[in-house]
């Protein structure tokens, strides 16, 4: 009975190589799409409007030593603390309608009044004024607030030209910490003037609202996107190695030595 020649790419060892190649390529493609989905989820999360959600205690949304989480942007929170009036700052270049003025921002030492000197402080935007000459009155003592959390600002190229005064160009923690004698939370808050606040310090100030969905930063989720691209590059490389191996096996099977050994 004549021997039936099995095609070189259908031999048992080749079938194992095919299965391994398909596994590597398929797994890399799946992981790439998984990372792409994570990238899109983070961007969708960053564009979510949370300003109308029910307020939660500050500790549930942001801890004193935590980096600012993406899911806390515009989140309403409640807090109790003590004003630090001597550390009030004015953020210049802020618009209200067609006018440009200042945000009035005072740190609130979060916690009991007896511990105010050592408690971490959250920067709180109390309102807007067209001019700070004279300076608006600052609140003192305990306060109970509802406010919207916001991530710290950090526009490239914008610096505080005079760190000796109380005017800053943006809500950047590196600038604000120069004027506050205690640790700062990793973000700031904007007072909700329609909430049931106590000693909010908003009298005589125009309210600052969170009217728009926060713009998603271009770098949001970029790491997941890069990981996805890396997995797809690996899938292409694995497919190349697999096809190259198949080609080499076919070439080797057609050489005179291989034909003679088969005969």
Image (cartoon, rainbow, N blue to C red):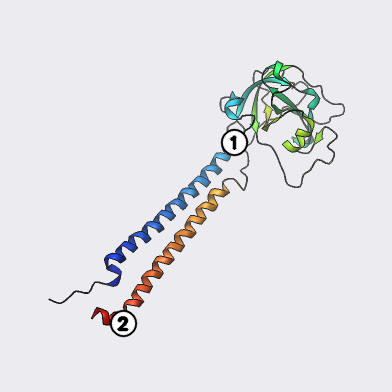
Residue placed under numbered mark 2 in the picture: 257
Residue placed under numbered mark 1 in the picture: 69
Relative vertical location of residue 146 with respect to residue 179 in this rendering, above or below: above
Where on the picture, by quarter, is residue 66?
top right
Residue drawn at point x = 58 percent, y = 40 percent = 46
Label 1 secondary element? loop
Residue extending furthest left? 1
Residue 29 image position (x, y, % from top left): 43, 55
Depth check, mark 1 against mark 2: the one in front is 2
Which comes before the other along the chain, label 1 or label 2?
Answer: 1
- Which numbered tag is attached to residue 253? none
Q: What is the CA distance from the residue labelled 1 to the residue labelled 2?
A: 66 Å
Residue 17 image position (x, y, % from top left): 34, 63
Task: Pick whichever, 128 or 257, lies toward us.
Answer: 257
Asked if one can make out residue 227 in the rendered structure from this viewpoint, the answer is yes
On screen, residue 21 versus residue 174, left or right, reads left
């Amino acid at each position: 009975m004549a021997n039936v020649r099995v095609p070189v790419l259908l031999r048992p060892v080749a079938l194992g190589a095919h299965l391994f190649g398909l596994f590597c390529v398929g797994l890399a493609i799946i992981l790439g799409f998984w990372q792409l989905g994570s990238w899109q989820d983070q961007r969708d999360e960053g564009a979510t409007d949370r300003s109308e959600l029910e307020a939660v205690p500050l500790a549930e949304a942001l801890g004193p030593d935590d980096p600012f989480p993406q899911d806390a942007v515009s989140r309403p929170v409640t807090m109790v603390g003590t004003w630090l009036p001597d550390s009030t700052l004015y953020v210049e270049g802020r618009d209200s309608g067609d006018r440009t003025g200042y945000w009035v921002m005072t740190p609130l030492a979060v916690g009991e009044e007896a511990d105010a000197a050592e408690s971490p402080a959250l920067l709180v935007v109390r309102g807007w004024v067209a001019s700070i000459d004279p300076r608006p009155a600052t609140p003192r003592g305990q306060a109970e607030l509802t406010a919207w959390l916001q991530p710290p600002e950090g526009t490239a190229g914008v610096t505080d030209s005079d760190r000796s005064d109380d005017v800053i160009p943006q809500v950047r923690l590196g600038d604000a910490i120069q004027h506050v004698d205690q640790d700062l939370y990793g973000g700031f808050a904007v007072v909700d003037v329609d909430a049931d606040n106590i000693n909010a310090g908003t009298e005589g100030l125009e309210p600052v609202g969170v009217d728009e969905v926060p713009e998603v930063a271009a770098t949001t989720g970029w790491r997941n996107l890069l990981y996805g691209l890396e997995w797809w590059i690996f899938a292409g490389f694995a497919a190349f190695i697999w096809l190259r191996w198949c080609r080499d096996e076919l070439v080797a099977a057609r050489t005179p030595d291989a034909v003679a050994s088969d005969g």
